[in-house]
Amino acid sequence: MWKKERLDELKNKLTASTKLTTLNFDVRDRNAVSNAVDSLPDEFSKIDVLINNAGNAHGLDPIDQGSLDDWDAMLDINVKGLLYVSKAVLPQMVERKSGHVINIGSIAGKEVYPKGNVYCASKHAVDAINQGMRIDLNEYGIRVGAVNPGAVETEFSNVRFKGDTEKAKNVYKGFQPLKPEDVADIIHFVITRPYHVNIADLVVMPTAQASGTIVKKSL
């Protein structure tokens, strides 16, 4: 419910400057996804850009100690959720022979780090889906690409550590991580390139970060 409240708050804030509509549904529920897309008002029913941004990490445990519920949540949201939403939107893009899909991946889809096992696997799946989607949709002139961020200070770590705010804050201490606005700005850049330009796969990290495990931190 809190996410719906945030959407409503954002909608009220932006209504004065633009037209918008919001939907609130669980991407893990294939019927909810289909019904939500079908419920769009006529003026918003033509989707030119799809940004698959739903994602989460749950837990940071060795594979033998991982939670089955955590694994289900990561695979259901990060992989199946992306597929369900794409399945609901792609047919209209194929019919029009135009559109742009941006899949939000992660550097965890480019490497594997200790205790990241299933989360990294889910983001490797996003990387593979992104490549396969680009190949399959090529004949329809649909742009497909991925943006793969490194450390971004959002609620990501708070979710991963089950609401342990202090533990989550420590992830970003001692260096300047990316901000959500940084990633949004990159997505805007990707979308606004001339249509013959497709940024197929982009990795972005804060300057202090060299890989999933190497971050230059000050004491």
Image (spheres, rainbow, N blue to C red):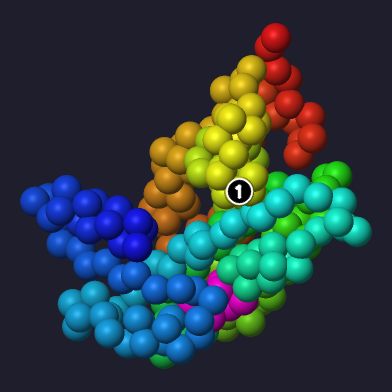
Quarter of the C terminus within the rendering: top right
Q: What's the residue at 35%, 82% (across, down)? A: 37
Q: Quadrant of residue 124?
A: bottom right
Q: Position of residue 213 (x, y in %)?
A: 79, 35
Badge 1 crowding class, 10 Å Cα cut-off, few under 14, some 14 to 19, many 20 or more, is few
Q: Nearer the viewer, residue 44 or 121?
A: 121
Residue range highlighted in magenta: 79-85
Residue 71 vs residue 104, the one in the foreground: 71
Q: Which residue is the extreme one toward the right?
A: 64
* Residue that appears at 24% across and 75% down: 44
Left or right: where 42 falls relative to 31: left
Dominant secondary structure (helix, strand or loop) of the stretch shown in magenta: helix
- Amino acid type, residue under disc 1 in the picture: Lys
Magenta stretch: includes residue 84? yes
Q: Which residue sits at x=46%, y=73%? A: 26
Kindly indicate the quadrant of the structure image that contains residue 103. bottom right
Residue that protrudes farthest toward the top in the picture: 219
Q: Is residue 34 visible?
A: yes
Q: Which residue is mark 1?
A: 162
Is 176 on the left-hand or right-hand side of 109? Answer: left
Residue 204 visible to an observer of this rendering: no
Residue at image x 76%, y 39%?
212
Decide: is 141 above or below 107: below
Q: Horizontally, is 24 left or right of 62 in the view? A: left
- Indicate the position of residue 32 as horizontal and vertical percent values: 42, 83
x then y, percent, for residue 90? 47, 82
